[in-house]
Image (cartoon, rainbow, N blue to C red):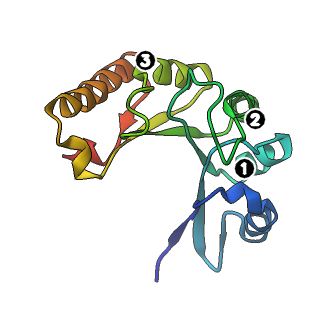
Amino acid sequence: GNESLHVEFFGGEPLLNWPVIDHILNRFGAGADGVAINYSITTNGYLIDDPMAKTLKRHGVTVTISFDAPNKHNRPLTGRVKGGRRVKKSLLTLQKHQNWVTFNSVLSKGAIREYDGVALVDEAVRYGVKMIGLILDLDLQFYQSKARRQKVVGELLSTYQYGASRNVPVVGYWYQI
């Protein structure tokens, strides 16, 4: 009875199974059997190339890049692979093909020391990223320290304000609260 469906490719690194994603996009396109289909993908961005970017654009796929520390060029992906520069190359490829791109960033125990909201927003502007999803750590132990709570709230607020000043919305489940 629904008139629309949203398909999200995520988990691990979905682009490792590009043939399946490509098949789904080309088989069902914008819809089937009277049901409109919208697509999105959440990826580390490492594997994106021109043919992928063209296909994602043709099918209107929102591309969300997990992007926590824009100034860290040796960003670890898996094992010993470092991907910061490669991800930025992928962002340029997506920008060239005018894809709809968003960032997801996490304020967590592992990311808080290297987090730089100004650099994150500036990178979003540089690569034509339309929105930043800022995700908070769900581990309550992370917030036991008053200093850490203040740091997270300060980073959240300053990123939100700086994003607004650069016309980059910064959103997250906290936004509704």
Q: Label 2's element?
A: loop
- Residue 28 percent coordinates (x, y): 72, 70
Tell me which label, 3 or 1, sits earlier in the chain: 1
- Residue 63 percent coordinates (x, y): 61, 46
Q: Badge 1, how many Cα within 10 Å: few under 14, some, many 20+?
A: many
For label 1, the residue is: 56
Tell me which label, 3 or 2, sits earlier in the chain: 2
Residue 163 found in image quarter:
top left
In three-dimensional space, the C-alpha distance between marks 3 and 2, rounded to whole angstroms, equals 26 Å
Tell me which label, 2 or 1, sits earlier in the chain: 1
Name the residue furthest left: 146
Q: Badge 3, how many Cα within 10 Å: few under 14, some, many 20+?
A: some
The type of residue carrying mark 1 is Leu
For label 3, the residue is: 118
Residue 74 found in image quarter:
top right
- The one nearer the camera, 15 or 139, is 139
- The one nearer the camera, 169 or 19, is 19
User: Residue at the spot x=67%, y=59% of the render?
Assistant: 14
In three-dimensional space, the C-alpha distance between marks 2 and 1, rounded to whole angstroms, equals 9 Å
For label 2, the residue is: 97
Q: Badge 2, how many Cα within 10 Å: few under 14, some, many 20+?
A: some
The type of residue carrying mark 2 is His
Name the residue furthest front: 80
The type of residue carrying mark 3 is Val
